[in-house]
Each structure stands twice: as C-alpha cells, then as structure tokens.
Image: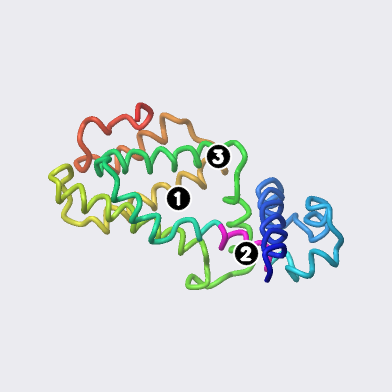
Amino acid sequence: MGEKSDIKRKFILDKAREVFSEKGYKNVTMKDIVDACDISRGGLYLYFSSTDELFLSVLSTENEEDDEETITAALTGTATAGDMLALFLKEQKKEILRKKNGLIVASYEYFFAKKVSVKDNPLKSQFDTAVRIIERLIENGVESGEFYCENPLGCARNLMYVVEGLKVTSKAVGISEEAIDNELMYVLQGLVPEELNNINNQ
C-alpha cells in the first residue's frame, strides 16, 4: 500500500472504531461504515470485505499501541514502580468509568457471537500485555524495596482479572467510583505502600 492508501485505511479504521463504540458489534453494517466515512461502498470494499474483518482490524490497531516498547518505556523513566502502577491503575479506572462504552461491549458481543478460540482473540493479547506491564512494575518495586511480593505474575494476573471484571460490571449493572477504588485497593493490600492507597490523588 502507498502512503495515500495507508492514510485512507487509517481514516476508515478511526471512523469504524467510533461506530463500533457507539453501536456495539452486532448492530453495525458495512453501510454504517460507508455513511460514517462518507465514501462509496466500493471504496470501503477496497480495504475491508466485511464488518468482521473491519472489527478485528480495529482491535489489532488498539493492541499495537501496547507492545513491548510501551512496556520498556514505562519502566525506564525516573518515576518509581509505585508511581507507575498508580498511573496504570488510574488509566484503567478511567476506562471503567467512561460513559461511552468504547469497544468493551462490541468486543464481548463479537467474541461471544463468533466463539473465537482463545489463541485467536486479540483481547487475550491485550490482557497478557497488561499483565506483563504490571508484573514488571511489581518486580521493579520488589527489587527497589518498594513492594513485597513472592509471586509478581500471580499478583499481576489477579489485578487484571479484577480490572476486567470491573469493566464488565460497570457496563452491565453500573458501579461507583468508590467501589472501584475499594476493589483495586483490596487486591493491592500488602503490596503497595501507604502513599498509593488513594488512586484518586495520584
């Protein structure tokens, strides 16, 4: 693809992300994407053959931002492991509280409807990347004496299971900001120092 084609493809993906975020997955048609992009049906089909392909491309684009370079960058600054963990959790909390559901609902609709295997699921890749980030932050904190943890990987997984559960709960039944803080801090008890006990103040 040339530069012009790359720009057009990115434009379509950006618009498609907005449509999927607003309508979920199952209610979106190729016509919705055509209308959002203000292009011809043929113009869209030059790049994507179906809403399935388009949706998976949107998810893959999201995941590209969370690669190993991002993890390395998060660990090479002057901030402490505790500061970085608090920042990470603050971003997760924003996602949980976001009124517009983003791609969360669309993602679950897609993967439940399509019965996609775990190994082919981009959400698994996203989850594993987040676990690696947290694990490395905890390991750094243990090395510096900031944290105490005998099983950084287990703690990281546990934390992400809670985060993902909170995302689903917030969309399905609603959840207060205070309840989110309580759940996150419950998982972190005994790991983080007192100054991290209030995510809101970070």
Please name the residue shown 49% across and 70% down the image.
Answer: 118
Residue 33 colored in magenta in the image = no
The reply to whether discs 2 and 3 touch (Cβ–Cβ < 8 Å) is: no
Residues packed near mark 3 inside 10 Å, few (<14), some (14 to 19) or many (20 plus): few
The amino acid marked with disc number 3 is Val
Cα separation between marks 1 and 2 = 22 Å
- The disc placed on residue 164 is 1
Q: Does dot 1 land on a helix, a strand or a loop?
A: helix
Q: Which residue is mark 3?
A: 173
Q: Identify the mark nearer the N-term, 1 or 2.
A: 2
Q: 126 and 118: which one is in front?
A: 126
Q: Identify the mark nearer the N-term, 2 or 3.
A: 2
Q: Which residue is mark 2?
A: 57
Query: Which x, y percent locates residue 193?
Result: 20, 35
**Quadrant in which the C terminus appears:** top left
Q: Nearer the viewer, mark 1 or mark 2?
A: 2
Q: Which residues are magenta?
A: 53-61
